[in-house]
Image: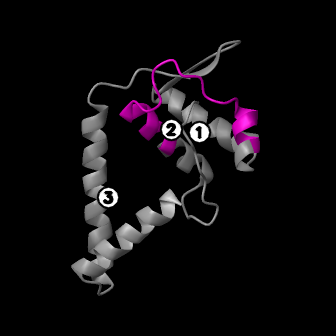
Amino acid sequence: MSGAVVQVDTTSPVPPYEQIRAQLAALIGSGRLPEGERLPTVRQLAADLGLAAGTVARAYRELEAASLVRTRRGAGTRAAPPPPGAERRERAELASGTRDFVAWAMSLGFGDEEVLKAVRQALREREA
């Protein structure tokens, strides 16, 4: 996986396998993980992330069930072609998630500027 990085936040309420699945799905859907690109082995990614191999295996199984990766004995797990309309669906998911986040933040009493400031801060922290 040249240049693509998967990270897991063990403090997140989102299960680690789902974090891996979502990040790899986004990389494949956006084309940043191109068709045919080989993913690390289950054991290698598990070791890199400090997780159990079963956690990574579950993420890979779910990606394969969604036709986002293909696994072949001897050839490893490779990115499949992005499904048609994947970018459109991802943009819709981003918009939906953003609306949910904004509604949640507003329900806590934060205003527009405070919400934008929090998002910018989160983006800066992610880059670091």
Which mark is on residue 59?
A: 1
Q: Amino acid at mark 2?
A: Leu
Q: Bin the neighbour count of mark 1 within 10 Å (Cα to Cα): few under 14, some 14-19, many 20 and up.
A: many
Q: Residue at x 29, y 84 (%)?
A: 110
Question: In the image, residue 117 lies at what x, y percent?
Answer: 33, 75
Whole-number angstrom distance, CA of label 2 to CA of label 3: 18 Å
Q: Mark 3 highlights which residue?
A: 97
* Kind of residue at disc 1: Ala
- Could you tell whether 125 is left or right of 113 in the image? right
Q: Nearer the viewer, mark 2 or mark 3?
A: 2
In the rendered image, residue 26 lying in the magenta stretch gets the answer yes
Which segment did they paint magenta? 23-47
Residue 71 visible to the viewer: yes
| Residue positioned 75% across, 46% down in the render | 52
- Identify the secondary structure beneath mark 3: helix
Please report the residue visible at 64 percent of the width from the left and 61 percent of the height from the top: 10
Q: Does 114 appear above or below 85?
A: below
Q: What's the residue type where badge 3 is placed?
A: Gly
